[in-house]
Amino acid sequence: MNKNSVEGMAVYPGTFDPIHFGHLDIIERGSKVFPQLLVGVGINPDKSTLFSLEERVALVKQTTSHLPNVIVLPFENLVVHFVKESNSKLILRGMRTTSDMDYEFTMSLANMALDPDIETVFLLAKDIYSHLSSSLLKQIAVLGGDLSKFIPPAVAKAMLEKIRRK
Ligand code: ADP
């Protein structure tokens, strides 16, 4: 176990539409803090996605395959139910700017009310990624901007193919 690691597997849930360097940074750092990290790729009823659930899972798997203690699974139920089914008690989330605070605060309190045994912990986004979001990436891709600073080549390729076919 890494000297900074805590006990138990954490679950990092998100939409990952698609996964970008901000997410990957949280996954890499999370994989050093927790003995095992389960990345849960879910469905957000408020967001219509560019990629299907299967495609999002495949891209997360492909871009995290170098991390031996990271596993990736889809889920279609509530985060707290997925966490419990996975025998975990920890949710990991990334926090970008203060604008993420409201949303993450509300979600954490809702999850706490739904299951008081489950705790949410946060890792702060690195400053170089704090502006990065999947929706910004979609705008850059549609307008023909350079994606290489924000996403791995395999994700950029998948994004460009997807946008071309739309
Ligand atoms: P959700 O729909 O659940 O918000 P996202 O894929 O948008 O899913 O985000 C998943 C998690 O990754 C959230 O905790 C979010 O705050 C975090 N995150 C998103 N973008 C970044 C970034 N640039 N740097 C660090 N964390 C991020």
Image: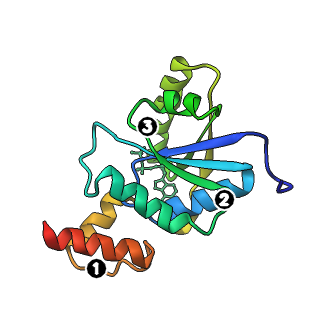
Question: Which residue appears at 52% of the width and 28% of the height?
Answer: 80
Mark closer to the chain start, 3 or 1: 3
Pointer 3 residue Cβ closer than 8 Å to ligand 1: yes
Q: Is residue 9 left or right of residue 134?
A: right
Judging depth in this view, the residue of 71 and 5 nearest the camera is: 71
Q: Are marks 2 and 1 in contact (CB under 8 Å)?
A: no
Tell me if I can see residue 114 in this picture.
Answer: yes
Mark closer to the chain start, 2 or 1: 2
Which type of secondary structure does the marked residue at label 3 adopt?
helix
Question: Which residue appears at 40% of the width and 31% of the height?
Answer: 77
Mark closer to the chain start, 3 or 2: 2
Residue receiving disc 3: 103
Residue receiving disc 2: 29
Tell me if I can see residue 130 in this picture.
Answer: no
Question: Which residue appears at 79% of the width and 44% of the height?
Answer: 6
How far is mark 2 from mark 1, CA to CA? 28 Å
